[in-house]
């Protein structure tokens, strides 16, 4: 009986492992392909002096190749996407350090709404997303490492609601990709051709990611022209309307999970002797003088600036948001066009060059 059970569990583990390895590149889940590629990138021999970490505000806002040239510090972007907070950044940094020497610093930049997200969200953000979106994504990306991080969080905060039953669903790749597989198989003859095309595309995108030192803009837009065409004032306005309403109805806060995640990240970097440089993200300039958002944004700014006062290895290198005009944005209130990415990167380079060595 025991032998049969072990064989059964072994088959399940083999199937799930194969699914996790082969399926993501050929599914339509583009965002997760970016996250998986960044995790793979962190395990390469990169020898970076500066790592960019955070969400898509930095992933699309900072050009690591340009920042390398302007500062003389080899820079690699390990920026993820909004569902991933400082727990993900810490796990990614630990992966990086397994094959690389310590960088001089980590440049940390997140959109303002990342701090509100909790491991279990009673109100989803953005509207309409899964309540446990952050937990599901990080479970799929980091597996048992994220489980251990959550257990540590639960030990430090016994009162915190952590729905561990969600972990089992999110952890099984066959559950995550079953819908994609079913949709593909229903096409019969086209499934294998499409799978081959997507796998080739994944390999090409991965090669570009390595060549561009982690800049993942090409995952979203084929080239600079496609990026320019992606500028959509209507989408920016709609995104801004949602953000304004969200900020108007709430005061700025840092969720317990986000606060604990940041504390663990800062504790680890301090122990390892890695500086943390905090930068404000880009933001639509319509919010700059909007009375409905001023209190929220002011409290956010105070929170970020407090990080440099509480930890000696943390420097807040910018004083305010990079206020971007509508023409400088793509399709949201914090994603910059290619041209504005260059300008923003140059401004950050000037700040970094002025820091004491």
Image: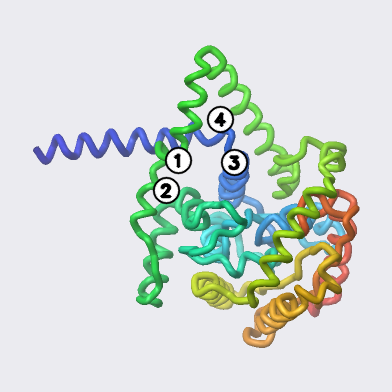
Q: Residues within 10 Å of mark 4 (few under 14, many from 20)?
A: many
Q: Quadrant of the N terminus?
A: top left
Q: Which residue is mark 3?
A: 33
Q: Earlier in the sequence, mark 1 or mark 2?
A: 2
Name the quadrant containing residue 107.
Answer: bottom right
**Cα distance, mark 3 to mark 4?**
9 Å
In the rendered view, tell whether residue 146 sits above or below residue 186.
below
Q: Is residue 298 left or right of residue 327?
A: left
Nearer the observer, 147 or 120 = 120
Q: Residue at x 76, y 59 (%)?
A: 240
**Cα distance, mark 4 to mark 2?**
19 Å
Q: Which residue is mark 1?
A: 176
Circle 4: element type? helix
Name the quadrant containing residue 289.
Answer: bottom right
Q: Earlier in the sequence, mark 4 or mark 2?
A: 4
**Cα distance, mark 1 to mark 2?**
7 Å
- Farthest residue toward the bottom? 309
Q: Residues within 10 Å of mark 3 (few under 14, many from 20)?
A: some
Q: Residues within 10 Å of mark 1 (few under 14, many from 20)?
A: some
In the image, residue 236 lies at what x, y percent? 79, 53
In the image, residue 340 lies at what x, y percent? 88, 55
């Amino acid at each position: 009986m025991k032998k049969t059970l072990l064989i059964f569990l072994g088959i399940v583990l083999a199937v799930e492992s194969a699914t996790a390895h082969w399926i993501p590149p050929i599914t339509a889940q583009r965002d997760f392909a970016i996250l998986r590629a960044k995790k793979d990138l962190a395990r390469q021999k990169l020898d970076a002096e500066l790592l960019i970490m955070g969400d898509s505000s930095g992933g699309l806002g900072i050009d690591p190749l340009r920042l390398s040239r302007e500062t003389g510090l080899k820079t690699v972007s390990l920026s993820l996407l909004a569902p991933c907070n400082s727990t993900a950044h810490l796990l990614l940094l630990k992966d990086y350090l397994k094959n690389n020497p310590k960088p001089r610093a980590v440049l940390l930049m997140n959109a303002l709404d990342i701090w509100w997200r909790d491991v279990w969200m009673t109100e989803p953000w953005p509207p309409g997303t899964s309540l446990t979106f952050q937990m599901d994504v990080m479970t799929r990306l980091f597996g048992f490492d994220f489980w251990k991080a959550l257990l540590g969080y639960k030990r430090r905060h016994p009162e915190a609601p952590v729905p561990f039953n969600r972990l089992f669903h999110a952890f099984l790749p066959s559950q995550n990709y079953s819908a994609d597989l079913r949709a593909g198989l229903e096409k019969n003859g086209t499934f294998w051709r499409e799978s081959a095309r997507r796998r080739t595309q994944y390999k090409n995108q991965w090669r570009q990611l390595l060549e561009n030192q982690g800049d993942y803009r090409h995952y979203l837009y084929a080239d600079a022209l496609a990026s320019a065409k992606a500028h959509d004032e209507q989408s920016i306005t709609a995104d801004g309307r949602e953000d304004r309403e969200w900020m108007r109805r709430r005061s700025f806060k840092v969720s317990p999970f986000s606060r604990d995640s940041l504390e663990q990240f800062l504790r680890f970097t301090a122990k390892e002797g890695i500086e943390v440089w905090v930068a404000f993200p880009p933001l639509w300039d319509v919010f700059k003088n909007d009375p409905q958002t001023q209190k929220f944004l002011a409290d956010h700014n105070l929170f970020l600036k407090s990080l440099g006062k509480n930890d000696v290895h943390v420097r807040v290198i910018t004083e305010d948001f990079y206020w971007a005009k509508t023409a400088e944005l793509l399709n949201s209130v914090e994603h910059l066009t290619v041209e504005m990415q260059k300008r923003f990167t140059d401004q950050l380079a000037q700040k970094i060059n002025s820091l004491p060595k």
